[in-house]
Amino acid sequence: MKKLLILSAAASAVLMAGGDIAPVEPVVAAPVVEASGWDFSGQAVVYYQTADTPTAVAALLGGATDADLFDQDGSRADFGLQLRAVNKDVFAGIGAGVEVSGLSTLNLENWLVSDVMQGTGGTDVDGLTDGGWISQMYLTYGIANTTFKLGRQELPKSLSPFAFSENWNVFKNTFDAALVVNTDITNTTIVGAWVGGANHNGLGALNDLTDFNSVNDDDGIYLLTVQNKSIENLTLTGSWYYAPDMAGTEDINILWGDAHYKAGDYCFAAQVGTVMSDAFNDDTVAWGLKAGGNFGMFDASLAYTGVDEGDTGVFNVGGVKTPLFTQMILNQGFIRSDNDTFVVRAGVKALGGKFGLAYDYTTDNSSADNDYQEFDLTYKTKAFNDTTTLFAGYIYRDADNWNDSQNVLRFWARYNF
């Protein structure tokens, strides 16, 4: 079952990983290939997180020492620098892009923190290292209504719900893939992809972003996504993954679909999917509903998802998140399998930015009977002529099998240039 290593790692989502989760619009757009020179850009990021760690939570995190908020033992930080260059027409319509990323502890582990948000090859949390990697390197080409993209690249959740680039951490994870996008059919976008390798977006020094591994030996994973917008205000998207011999000698097939309908200031959505293989004792089936609206400076939504007791649950090959409507900052480990989850969200634009509130209640249907609750309070704004995004978040979480609740604070600043 060696070919299940990547799948198993993704399905066993790290409980303390998290992110700034925002609704993802289901838009799959063909990249436009235009003649131009080199476009240089980048970003610099400062990221800090601190959490208290009750005994039961510490055990789940590998025996971490009990810590209070702002204690060195319960805190982690990173400085990141990312540089990219893109040319949409290097020669004869062939475009190219390259992106390099680097992470540094800034020696904060000596007095302020004990770990990092993302790692670059440290063998343990006592051996934190600075490092860098090529996060993207690809070629593009367009002919008529078809575009091609070959190489290391980001994949969006709207296109690839089970292998996507997560944006909650310092930098996104990326994939070694071949991508084809066609828009010949009116109001329809067809996407085909082969994914061969990936790094993994997790939490801490032991999660090495410089390490790209095959996702399914030499066979890779095939993806077909079709999106149609023929009916006004309605977007229908369906995806099929085929992973030959990924479960030992058996194939894995994943089907996932969603529908989004927008009626003025209101929106409604549904999702359903399954992970199947003859090697499984039980296939996984998941479904969800969401409704929301905008009311001037306010917005609100209600979401429900259910996942049965299938072998794999719902996962992301390249990280720890799920494509479920109820995904919040830290709840992925509780919603991915054998549960029913309700999430209520509200937002208000104020003080030059936006405040967000979200509450999750998850009923664990497994024998563990470990029901879960999470409350997220966030604020995000832009500064310095919109070049810099600032984020602050407070997360309260509790589970029936924990001896105490947990509090997490997260702060980051992202400067784009």
Image (spheres, helix red, strand yellow):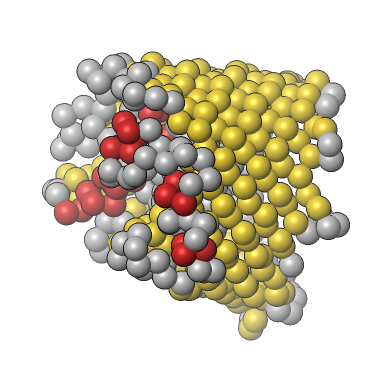
Q: Residue at x 30, y 65 (%)?
A: 123
Which percent across, then down, holds residue 364? 34, 18
Q: Residue 272: tell me if it is visible.
A: no
Left or right of residue 215, residue 349 in this image? right
Rendering coords of residue 256 (x, y %): 43, 34
- Relative side of 63 to 184, left or right: left
Q: Which residue is drawn at 40% across and 37% down?
A: 53
Q: On the image, which quarter does residue 101 sit in?
A: bottom right
Decide: is 132 above or below 197: below
Is residue 185 shown left or right of residue 6?
right
Q: Residue at x 83, y 27 (%)?
A: 297
How many discs mark residues in the rendered view? 0
**Drawn side of residue 31 relative to residue 114, left or right:** right
Q: Is residue 71 visible?
A: yes
Quadrant in the picture for residue 403:
top left
**Residue in front for this viewpoint, 395 or 155:** 395
Up the image or down, 133 lies above or below 303; here it is below
Relative depth, front residue between 296 and 237: 296
Q: Position of residue 72 (x, y in %)?
A: 47, 51
377 over 171 or under it: above or below: above
Please name the residue shown 37% across and 48% down the image.
317
Residue farthest along the bottom direction in this orientation: 91
Rendered location of residue 333, percent (x, y): 38, 34
